[in-house]
Image (cartoon, rainbow, N blue to C red):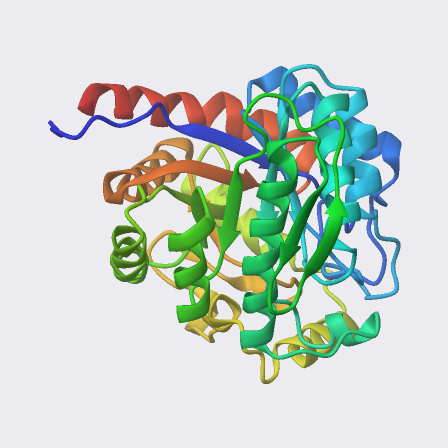
Amino acid sequence: MTSIKRPAPKFDWFVPIDGDGNHIGTVSAERPPTFEYLRQVVQAAEDTGYYSLLIPTRFSNGLFEETSPLAETWTTATALAAVTNKIRFLVAVRPGFISPGMWAQMASAFSNISNGRLDINIVPGGIQGDFERLGIRSNHTERYALATEFIEASKLLWKSPKPMDYKGKIIELEQAMVSPTPVGDGPRWYLGGASGNALNLAGQQADNLLMWIQPIAQIAELMERAKKSFQENNRRAEFGIRTHIIVRNTESEAWEAAEDLLSKANNVVREQRQASFAGTAMVGQQAQSRSYEDHRVGKRLWNGISTVRVNCGTAIVGDPRQVADELMEYWRLGIDEFILSGYPHLEEAKRVGETVVPLLKETIEEEL
């Protein structure tokens, strides 16, 4: 029995803005990211009882051929918020592409439209070449310095609708204002990253450090480094993990599903992904795309998805009990939020929510 009081675990789903299907890494998605399809995914997640939805940010398609259709993050998220009632939205934003003052107004409008169902996933890093696509050139350290001021300025703007000034080394605002301000206490801030810059920023500003799944030992080491940063800033550390799930009735069926997922992958897509990973400064991306025999990262971890997908490319594979037990090990480390996904997202939201999540909740309740 643990003596530490833990919050109830949160289970989130993912919005596939790149497209979706039974197979990934193809030139075109079997299910393009139309608003109608994404609405079905989101409503399935809400009906199944997920807490929130992660909507990533992309400047090109990161799962299929890079020029394939892509749903723009903020427009899509706002539209989806208008057709849901309870589920929250964890919306990714990259500082540097929209003026901080204008962005603060956009986020506040979203908060009011959704009755406060907004949280922010701040993304200072980026896939190789992404920033350059839109005319931005900066290095890893500069992006984190900008992100620090971006968060500070946003929090200050949301405190009061009265005009205010903010003068940082990068961002300067004169008599800026946001009215109405966000609902309630405003959005919570999530940060994903594993570099020293990421952990320093998390300790200073983030409410939750998000990690892409890795073997237990690596996640434990990352969490220990992050806790030092939170402690140095006299702030409570909170952790979430992002992983794909491939679950079937039996273990053998799950591994067959993993192999089938990539069975139609195109070499053009593989080459585009490898080009985007080459020389990346993203510590987490380096870990996700590391080479393993048969992509077996561990007994239950498989990173074959990383051959055709940017960012998180590792899945937990097994039957419902095996997957729940694997996730339980991360909960025991101190993970209190799980951002899950599976292909295709519409069917898998229900499958994971009805088979894995109840088993995990039951096991956690037994140990609390």
Whether residue 267 is visible to the viewer of this picture, yes or no, is no
Residue 172 appears in which quarter of the rendering?
bottom right
Identified at 86% across, 45% down, the residue is: 32
Left or right of residue 211: residue 26: right
| Residue 354 image position (x, y, % from top left) | 51, 21
Q: Give the farthest residue toward the bottom.
A: 279
Residue 162 appears in which quarter of the rendering?
top right
The quadrant of the image that shows the N terminus is: top left
Q: Total marks drawn? A: 0
| Residue 70 image position (x, y, % from top left) | 84, 52
Whether residue 198 is visible to the viewer of this picture, yes or no, is yes
Left or right of residue 272: residue 54: left
| Residue 326 image position (x, y, % from top left) | 33, 42
Residue 61 position (above or below residue 151): below
Residue 272 appears in which quarter of the rendering?
bottom right
Judging depth in this view, the residue of 7 and 164 nearest the camera is 164
Residue 285 position (above or below residue 165): below
| Residue 105 image position (x, y, % from top left) | 77, 38
Identified at 82% across, 51% down, the residue is: 29
Identified at 82% across, 66% down, the residue is: 66
Judging depth in this view, the residue of 189 and 272 nearest the camera is 189
The quadrant of the image that shows the C terminus is: top left
Judging depth in this view, the residue of 156 and 257 nearest the camera is 156
